[in-house]
Image (spheres, helix red, strand yellow):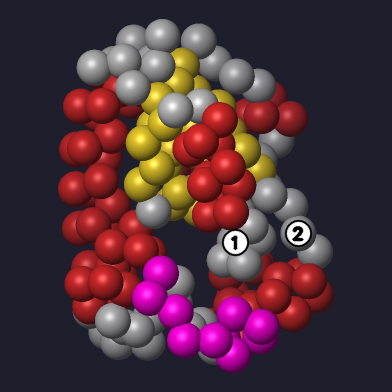
């Protein structure tokens, strides 16, 4: 049975690093929208079109993921999944395809996230966005931490 792995956490929490590790360990297809978006549109995090572009990329990546799951391939969605409703939706989608699902939550204190963000922003990257700290702070307030029941594997 294929497994859908959901990477849950804020920017700079280590999602992509863990996703890369799981990609090797689980023989999984890793889909990280930021890598696609930066490559296609550059550093557009502060542009008005960013969110619409990001949504389109995530929708296309789900199309790829759903086909891979149906074929029996493990998939990692490195989307962040900040809201419980979104996590539950993708777990339901996996179940409809006959796949199991797992949530991988990276819980990092706010101060550490901001420290990592500053370090990340100091480097030019072709795979991640430059995010001003003032953009990150409202996201920290919005983020819904997974409950213990969400962290259980679902077959």
Q: Residue at x 70, y 35 (%)?
A: 147
Which residue reaches farthest front? Answer: 24
Magenta-span inclusion, residue 83: no
Q: Is residue 133 above or below residue 138?
A: below
Q: Residue at x 43, y 38 (%)?
A: 76
Q: Please name the predominant secondary structure of the magenta segment in the image.
A: loop
Which secondary structure lies at badge 1? loop
Is residue 82 in view? no
Is residue 149 in view? yes
Picture coordinates of residue 31, whole percent (x, y) = 36, 47
Disc nearer the start of the sequence (1/2): 1
Q: Are marks 1 and 2 in contact (CB under 8 Å)?
A: yes
Residue placed most toward the observer, 135 or 42 = 42
Picture coordinates of residue 75, whole percent (x, y) = 39, 32
Q: Residues within 10 Å of mark 2 (few under 14, many from 20)?
A: some
Label 1 to label 2, Cα distance in Å?
A: 8 Å
Q: Is residue 58 above or below residue 85?
A: below
Task: Please tell me how many numbered marks the rendered image carries.
Answer: 2
User: Can you tell which mark lies on residue 108?
Assistant: 2
Query: Image quarter for residue 62?
Result: top left
- Position of 58 with respect to 8 (left or right) is left
Residue placed under numbered mark 1 in the picture: 10
User: Can you tell which mark lies on residue 121?
Assistant: none
Magenta-span inclusion, residue 119: yes
- Position of 152 with respect to 5 (left or right) is right
Which secondary structure lies at badge 2? loop
Q: Residue at x 20, y 58 (%)?
A: 56
Q: Which image quadrant: the N terminus?
A: top left
Q: Which residues are magenta?
A: 118-127
Picture coordinates of residue 131, whole percent (x, y) = 51, 82
Q: Residues within 10 Å of mark 1 (few under 14, many from 20)?
A: many
């Amino acid at each position: 049975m294929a497994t859908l792995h959901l990477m849950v956490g804020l920017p700079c929490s280590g999602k992509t690093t863990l996703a890369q590790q799981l990609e090797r360990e689980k023989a999984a297809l890793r889909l990280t929208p930021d890598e696609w978006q930066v490559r296609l549109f550059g550093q557009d995090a502060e542009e008005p079109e960013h969110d619409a572009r990001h949504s389109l990329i995530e929708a296309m990546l789900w199309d790829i993921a759903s086909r891979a799951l149906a074929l029996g391939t493990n998939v990692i969605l490195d989307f962040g999944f900040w809201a419980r409703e979104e996590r539950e939706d993708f777990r339901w989608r996996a179940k409809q395809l006959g796949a199991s699902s797992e949530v991988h939550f990276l819980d990092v204190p706010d101060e550490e996230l901001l420290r990592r963000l500053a370090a990340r922003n100091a480097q030019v990257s072709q795979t991640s966005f430059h995010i001003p700290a003032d953009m990150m702070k409202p996201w920290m307030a919005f983020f819904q931490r997974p409950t213990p029941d969400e962290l259980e594997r679902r077959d």
